Amino acid sequence: QGQLVESGGGLVQAGGSLRLSCAASGRTISRYAMGWFRQAPGKEREFVVSIRANGANKYYTDSVKGRFTISRDNAKNTVYLQMNSLKPEDTAVYYCAAARGPFATALIGEYDTWGQGTQVTVSS
């Protein structure tokens, strides 16, 4: 059911910033909550942030609060993740996901469409 493509990952020094993009095709994301997850080597995939379909409510995991910001541009069918003050522990593959409905939070089971992931590496 459609596809999501992440971009914007790369190598950055600690304290730097990156902006990830998630472009959707084959579906209109305006009706769905969207989320970002990440997975580091040897660890389980973890929730980072989600945003409601209307953009009104955002839910962040504690480790990124105050540093990461999710936004969406439904007209462009794109979701963004602005990452500031990056830390080495932020190093992971970041995945964009679309939920089954307009409301979703931290549970992987709430999402039914996933991107391929983009690598973010933060050096000390």
Image (tube, grey):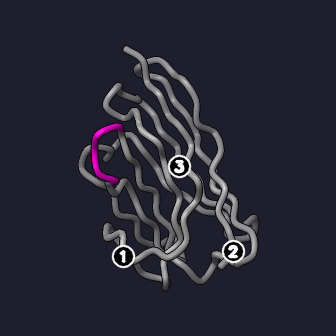
Q: Is residue 103 above or below residue 68?
A: below
Along the horizontal axis of the image, is 102 left or right of 23?
left
Distance between the alpha carbons at the discs numbered 2 and 3 = 20 Å
Q: Position of residue 83 (x, y in %)?
A: 47, 39
Amino acid carrying label 3: it is Leu
What mark, if any, has residue 109 been given in the picture? 1
Q: Which sits earlier in the primary sequence, circle 2 or circle 3?
A: 2
Q: Is residue 117 above or below residue 83?
A: below
Q: Residues within 10 Å of mark 2 (few under 14, many from 20)?
A: few
Task: Check disc 2 and report its element: helix, strand or loop.
Answer: loop
The quarter of the displayed image where residue 79 is located: bottom right
What mark, if any, has residue 36 been given in the picture? none
Residue at point 28%, 54% (across, down): 61
- Discs 2/3, front: 2
The quarter of the displayed image where residue 26 is located: bottom right
Question: Circles 3 and 1: CB distance less than 8 Å?
Answer: no
Residue at point 59%, 83% (across, down): 31
Residue under pointer 3: 81
Residue extending farthest to the left is 62
Q: Examine the residues drawn in magenta and state their main secondary structure.
A: loop
Residue under pointer 2: 2
Residue at point 41%, 71% (across, down): 57
Report the quarter where the N terminus lies.
Answer: bottom right
Amino acid carrying label 2: it is Gly
Task: Check disc 3 and report its element: helix, strand or loop.
Answer: strand
Q: Which residues are magenta?
A: 41-45
Nearest the camera: 112 or 105?
112
Q: Position of residue 30 (x, y in %)?
A: 63, 78
